[in-house]
Image: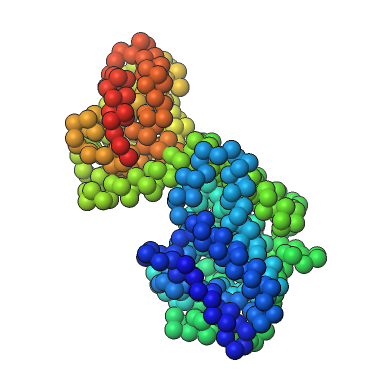
Amino acid sequence: MFTTDIDAEGIATVTIDMPGRSMNVIDWALTDALDAEARALAANPAVKAIVLTSGKKDFVAGADLAIMHDLYDLTPEAASDRIGTLGAMVRAFETSGKPVVGAAPGTALGGGLEILLGCNYRIAADNPKARFGLPEVTLGILPGAGGTQRLPRIIGIPAALPVLVYGKPMTAEQAKAAGILDEVVPPDNLLAAAKAAVREGRVRPGQPWDEKGFALPGPAPQSSEAMDLFSSWNAKVLAETSGNRPAPKAILSCVFEGTRVPIDAGLKIERDYFGTLVTGDVAPAMVWATFEARIAASKEGRNIADPDGPYVTSGVSALLEETRRLREEGVPDSTIETAAAQLGMARTPKDFGAGKEIAEMSEAMDTVPLEDVKDRLLFAQVSAAATALQGGAVALAAEADYGAVAGWGFPVHLGGPIYFARQLGPEGLEQRMGKLETAYGLRFAPPPVIAAVTDAAKP
């Protein structure tokens, strides 16, 4: 799992190297073991400094998703406490009283970067393939081991928000330019550079945010500049998510609330928001659609998300056909586009080149309520996916879900059409689709057919 070597100068090098894995990932066992090691090294008078590194080509690629499944069914409070063990491990290193250097040979994402952020000094190898970032938001959650608290304290609120809210990874040089890394060095010089930083006194024990009088770089959290910034970001997040994905807003709240209080209080705020997100409906759906379904689908060896492939083409056709029907009933394009946006679709009918063969009425007549427009667009896609799965055009529910999300823009927060239908269940399908049948005539695969597919389909 890891080894520790203490050299003649008293520098302890902790090398993470999880057996049987191509990349290091964080699980509960590694968390507990590293926590115990941090405390042991802190208590060892022979240890003068600590270097955290990896025995693999990358540092730590984030958390094992088994951690997520362990948390889904807990209460928010219990999930907060459980993820707190990971945060406590990072905190144990940074409060060890010893200078701690993080030395990353390659990628550090999610919890891996959070470990680095807990180090007093951060060095990365000049590895063009390495990526650094906090992509938790793309899974419907937020960094739960201090990322929303340490990053603003290191680079300031304005620079931290886009990293946290969008989750886009960056290269080592970009991370250094942002102030996340202190050095980028040749790969062969990584450990030597880490020890040199200690030897030359460039790494002080403890973190600046644990010192009296600490102030964040850039605008103070209570300043009018920061308040304007948060207002702008809140509006941006609402516009981009239509309120369907709670993680970006929770991240803003973590930074807003947490940077106004001491670090330990901020970490508690972060854990509580994490607990609420991970036990909600959206996080499991997004983890499935963006990661687990993609992996399962890729094992089949088909590019089911190919925009020119038959599956994606069938989904787009179903969406455009329902758009055509709505227009025939007098629903203006603006309402259809609003419905698609509010559903959380990554692409709307207009993005697929919905034609103008049916002219909009001079006076917009919303003959179909907006919620019904949304359901008609939604169930047209669910029906297309279920029909494809039933007919063998796709072999797995994972393929149907990943292909719909990545291929034609099905709302990611719903987990994919088959995942969504399965969560809705037979009674929910009968209720929602039965209403459409009564009001507008049956145009989709009937609820029993979709229910039968979701009962039989395995992830």
Give left or right: position of 313 versus 87.
Answer: left
Give left or right: position of 240 versus 48.
Answer: left
Where is residue 414? Give x, y as percent: 42, 35
Where is residue 37? Give x, y as percent: 59, 69
Q: Quadrant of residue 336?
A: top left
Between 436 and 7, the residue placed more toward the observer is 7
- Residue at (55% x, 45% y) in the render: 248
- Residue at (55% x, 64% y) in the render: 33
Can residue 343 be seen? yes
- Residue at (64% x, 71% y) in the render: 40
Give left or right: position of 6 versus 126.
Answer: right
- Residue at (55% x, 60% y) in the render: 31
Reply above or below: 5 against 155. below
Where is residue 262? Give x, y as percent: 75, 56
How many numbered marks have been drawn onto this rendered protein structure? Answer: 0
Give left or right: position of 85 versus 317.
Answer: right
Where is residue 418? Give x, y as percent: 34, 33
Between 343 and 101, the residue placed more toward the observer is 101
Reply above or below: 344 against 35. above
Reply above or below: 354 against 236. above
Between 132 and 229, the residue placed more toward the observer is 132
Q: Quadrant of the C terminus?
A: top left
Name of the residue lying farthest toward the right: 212
Can residue 362 be seen? no
Name of the residue lying farthest toward the top: 438
Reply above or below: 120 against 167. below
